[in-house]
């Protein structure tokens, strides 16, 4: 007799799906000082000089290996949103 645990099945599906939620030409980044929030941004942002400053701060803070596994930006969420809105417009 098998016991189904819907929460575990749903969690596995969510983890598989989350990596597919990033469309081609975009990447996921985690932003925040304490609690990290996930944003999906165009990869073209990575080449902008202002975004390069954030990437340099990330290297200083975390190095090239971070336990979260993703690209993590150590800045306030409102600062990140302001920057990305300027880059998009």
Image: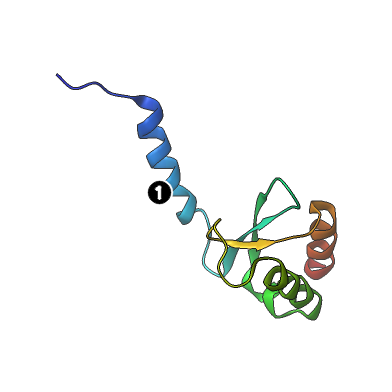
- Residue at the image point whose x is 41% and y is 28% from the top: 7
The x, y position of residue 31, in whole percent, is 71, 55
The x, y position of residue 78, in whole percent, is 84, 53
Image quadrant where one finds the N terminus: top left
Is 71 displayed left or right of 53 in the figure? left
Is 68 displayed left or right of 78 in the figure? left
Is label 1 in a helix, a strand or a loop? Answer: helix
Is 2 displayed left or right of 44 in the figure? left
- Residue at the image point whose x is 70% and y is 45% from the top: 35
Number of callouts in the render?
A: 1
Asked which quadrant contains residue 47, the reply is bottom right
The x, y position of residue 88, in whole percent, is 78, 67
- Residue at the image point whose x is 79% and y is 81% from the top: 49
The x, y position of residue 65, in whole percent, is 55, 68
Relative height, residue 52 to residue 89 (above, below): below
Relative height, residue 80 to residue 9 (above, below): below
Q: Residues within 10 Å of mark 1 (few under 14, many from 20)?
A: few
Image quadrant where one finds the C terminus: bottom right
Name, please, the residue furthest toward the left: 1
- Residue at the image point whose x is 45% and y is 42% from the top: 14
Q: Which residue does the numbered mark 1 point to in the structure image? A: 16
């Amino acid at each position: 007799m098998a016991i189904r645990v819907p929460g575990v099945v749903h969690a596995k599906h969510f983890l598989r799906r989350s990596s597919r939620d990033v469309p081609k030409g975009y990447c996921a980044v985690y932003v925040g000082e304490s609690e990290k929030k996930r944003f999906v941004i165009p990869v073209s942002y990575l080449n902008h000089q202002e975004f390069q400053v954030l990437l340099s701060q990330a290297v200083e803070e975390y190095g090239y290996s971070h336990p979260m596994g993703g690209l993590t930006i150590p800045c306030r969420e409102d600062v990140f949103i302001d920057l990305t809105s300027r880059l998009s417009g």
